[in-house]
Amino acid sequence: MASLRRSISRKFRAVIERIHIEQLKVQAHVGVPADERSQPQRLTLNLTFWPRSSPQQDELAGTVNYSAVARTARETVSRHHYKLIETIGEEVAAALLQQFAINKVEVEVRKFVLPDSDYVSVTAVREAS
């Protein structure tokens, strides 16, 4: 198997276009009224990010650790009380761009509060400068 990997890696350059984390569950104090912000609510985050480089070997060091990305997203959400899910998306996107070697990130924040709907969501898309 290792020799097959080596021969494939010599013939083709590995390109990771994007990594996606679907429905990361987080707890957030969010809402316009203060009483809504007083208790944590379940949100989900969909995170898509484009690493600056692709692994040349089957090693974590060559890419972005998605467990660390998830941890950073959770920590960012838990740090403050927010009025808007838009602000959560912006802050998570900024934190990920600052802490990881990524070119672009999309952060979709889903909130489950609107009657007769599955969820309300916003998506922040940011690129490294």
Image: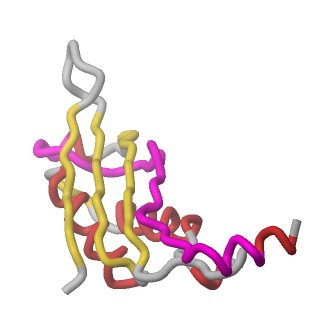
> Which residue corresponds to the image point at 40% horizontal and 40% vertical from the top-left?
42
Which percent across, then down, holds residue 13? 55, 77
- The boundaries of the magenta stretch are 6-35
Answer whether residue 87 is magenta in the image.
no
Residue 82 is left or right of residue 4, and the answer is left
- Is 6 or 77 nearer to us in this picture? 6
> Which residue corresponds to the image point at 55% horizontal and 73% vertical from the top-left?
14
Q: Residue furthest left?
A: 32
Q: Is residue 20 shown above or below 101?
A: above
Q: Residue furthest top?
A: 116
- Is 35 or 86 nearer to us in this picture? 86
> Which residue corresponds to the image point at 38% horizontal and 78% vertical from the top-left?
102
Q: The C terminus is located in which quarter?
A: bottom left
Q: Is residue 82 shown above or below 99?
A: above
Which percent across, then down, holds residue 22? 46, 45
Q: Is residue 28 shown above or below 77?
A: above
Which percent across, then down, holds residue 80? 29, 65
